[in-house]
Image (cartoon, rainbow, N blue to C red):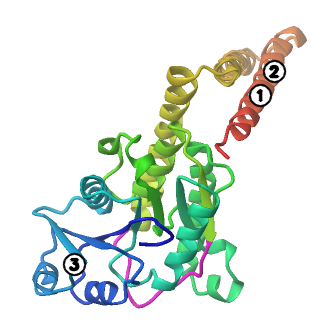
Amino acid sequence: MYRGLKIITAVPAHQAEATVLGVIETMPKIVDTILVVDDGSKDRTWQVLSENKNPRLVLLRHEKNQGVGGAMVTAFQHALELGCDVVVKMDSDGQMHPEDLAPLLDALIDGKYDYAKGNRFLDHRPHLAKMPKIRLLGNLALTFLTKMASGYWHIFDPQNGFIAARTSVLRRLEIDRIARDYFFENDMLINLNIIGARIVDVPMPARYGRERSSMRIATVLLKFPLRLFWGYWRRIIERFVLRDFSPLVLFLFAGLGMMIFASVFGGMAWYQSYRTGVVTPTGTIMIAALPFILGFQLVLQALLLDIQSTPR
């Protein structure tokens, strides 16, 4: 136990025969249960896990690969059955170091937060410089999109998978709705905001070994923005319409409606002027410009209300 809390670490493992035992062997004593989910590995991962005699080890297995999110959903559900206070996710590649676990838990406990996550951008520059440049650029772009989609404007580094969650908040989540693939971390933030969970970022160094991520940059660039777009609208509707109605929704939909009207009307007027060669009357221009300006102001106001509504 750690500071009176029972801790379970969930370790999603896929093709991790070379590294997963190292993660288990270096797990701090403050961890009560090490819950490893073999996510359909085709190598010797399950065999080396089965041969391990660590008394804290609990093994689960997916016959088919479901993705990191699928493994974590299974781990969350089983952790709730086992009974614990906090579930911590640690990857099986050894890039999440044991010494970073206690600070993550301290931030969760001292601030009475529901969810804590690592943030590599808050650490010292020498560590951050080790992050591959393609990951750094992708992380910066995804951070802004995830801030908007999730509503957690104060968090950074949303792809950081070193997370700790209280089981009290996991019981409030619809766990089956969480994304099963590498969108897991981003989707967790969206779902947590819907129920008003409080989140904190914890500084930790960026650690990278020789392991190569199986997440393809092209997949992220093509799929994540669209999924974040739909996640944004799901969050807005569920939190600010179905759970607790907010004027944010009125500002947002009225503003977008006015901007769409202005864009369509203005575009048609421009095309008519281009086709006929007749200069567009000032009144017509104003009919297009004023709704767009007013709509833009309403959308900005909705954005400010969303930022102010961030659970603190």
Residue under label 2: 294
Q: Which region shows up in magenta?
A: 203-215
**Amino acid under disc 2:** Leu
Dot 3: what SS?
Answer: loop
Residue under label 3: 15
Q: Residues within 10 Å of mark 1 (few under 14, many from 20)?
A: some
Position of residue 267 in the picture relative to residue 137 (left or right): right
Q: Where is residue 14 in the image (x, y as percent from the top left)?
A: 24, 73
Rounded to the nearest angstrom, the CA distance separating label 1 from label 2 is 5 Å
Q: Nearer the viewer, residue 284 or 231?
A: 231
Rounded to the nearest angstrom, the CA distance separating label 1 from label 3 is 49 Å
Q: Nearer the viewer, residue 129 or 72?
A: 72
* Pair 3/2: label in front: 3
Task: Answer with the quarter of the image where residue 199 lies.
Answer: bottom right
Position of residue 213 in the picture relative to residue 37 (left or right): right
Against 223, is 285 above or below?
above
The verdict on residue 55 being magenta is no
Q: Which of marks 3 and 2 is nearer the N terminus?
A: 3
Q: Where is residue 252 in the image (x, y as percent from the top left)?
A: 67, 24
Dot 1: what SS?
Answer: helix
